[in-house]
Image: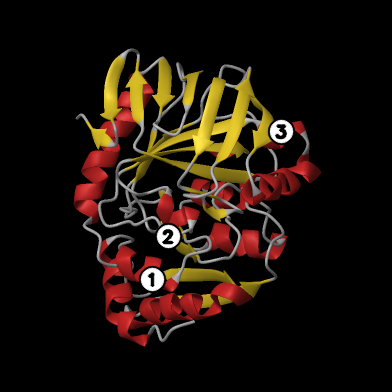
Amino acid sequence: MKDLSRLQGDATRILETCLGVQGGEEVLIVTDEPLREIGELLWQAAKDLQADAAIVEIVPRESNGAEPPAMVAEAMRKAAVVLAPTSKSLSHTAARKAANEAGARIFTLPGILPDSLERALQGNYERIAKISNKVAEVLTNGKRVRVTTPAGTDITMDIQGRQGYPDTGIVREPGLFSNFPAGEAFIAPVEGTANGVFVVDGSMSGAGILDKDPITFNVKDGYVTDITGGAGARQIVELIKPFGQPARNIAELGIGTNDQAELCGSPLEDEKVLGTVHIAIGDNKTFGGKVAVPSHLDGIMLNPTIEVDGVILMEAGELKL
């Protein structure tokens, strides 16, 4: 991993401005060996703000959404602020949700790359928050969504009764949560309602960049029935095989709102790219859905057109707000 010391000042600034870290607050960094250096960078940033900072390294989880050790989950619940740079995502875990419910302010940074971290530290999160909140409101008030792309995506899903969530990067109040880098609005479609096909031509959790090897997902009544393509498709089939049908659930519709994010092969950043849409399969229990499974895989699509109740929200990758 490249030398991160030059990012120390920016990391300290982000902890202060986005998380509102103050002197004396108990700040917990949860990391694992692949992201240890980023964990240590954030730990030092918290110390620079005179926080009562602690860092714990866990054994890397086997899949995104797998729970951390119970003792770490308990520590998360007792902290004022939690930052989780881990190789597998803790975003969609009961531990993260319980910590939020106990009042913790949380950033998760699953699989973050050094270059992604550098770009993320330069973001204008007040502006990103404004866009993300607007898109989330449209989703909350919507009933039915259709997504199409030049690569062949054409899928519909119902969202009536579900809440749209903004991922703003501004988590200064107790109980708030965001990815970092932030910048999306997302919703859990109603289970059993998605039908059509989506073609992932940007990147995919577990498969990387897919510009030359897109993955096609056929969907019927809310579940993926068939996954086709090259090596990336075969990787996804193997990743979800241990978890059965729940891992094929259409779990999330998300819309990127971060103008600093770049497609780089890390879903954490890729799903935030302004002008993209992503559909995730698997778990959605932590943001309004009903499916609980230790797998959550995001597929990012380029240049989408998104219609909510027949009104265009995004056209060929351009938001119409």
Instruction: Tell me the amino acid under the disc marked 1.
Output: Asp
- Above-or-below relation of 307 to 296: above
Q: Residue drawn at (71%, 62%), measured in percent from left and top?
A: 69
- SS label for mark 2: loop
Neighbourhood count class around disc 3 (C-alpha, 10 Å): few under 14, some 14–19, many 20 upward: some
Q: Residues within 10 Å of mark 2 (few under 14, many from 20)?
A: some
Question: The disc labelled 2 sits on which kind of residue?
Answer: Cys
Q: Is residue 84 left or right of residue 58?
A: left
Closer mark to the observer between disc 2 and disc 1: 2
Residue at position x 42%, y 75% in the image: 42
Q: Which residue is at the front of the view, 117 or 9?
A: 117
Q: Quadrant of residue 313?
A: top left
Mark 3 vs 1, N-terminal side = 1
Q: Does 2 sit above or below residue 285? A: below
Circle 3 residue: 246
Eyeballing the image, is 163 above or below 119?
Answer: above
Which image quarter: residue 194? top right
Q: Secondary structure at mark 1?
A: helix
Q: Position of residue 219 (x, y in %)?
A: 61, 24
Which secondary structure lies at badge 3? helix
Q: Is residue 217 left or right of residue 126?
A: right
Is there CB contact under 8 Å for labels 3 and 1?
Answer: no
Is 34 in front, or is 207? Answer: 207
Task: Name the quadrant of the C terminus.
Answer: top left
* Crowding near the residue tagged with mark 1, few <14, some 14–19, many ≥20 C-alpha atoms within 10 Å: few
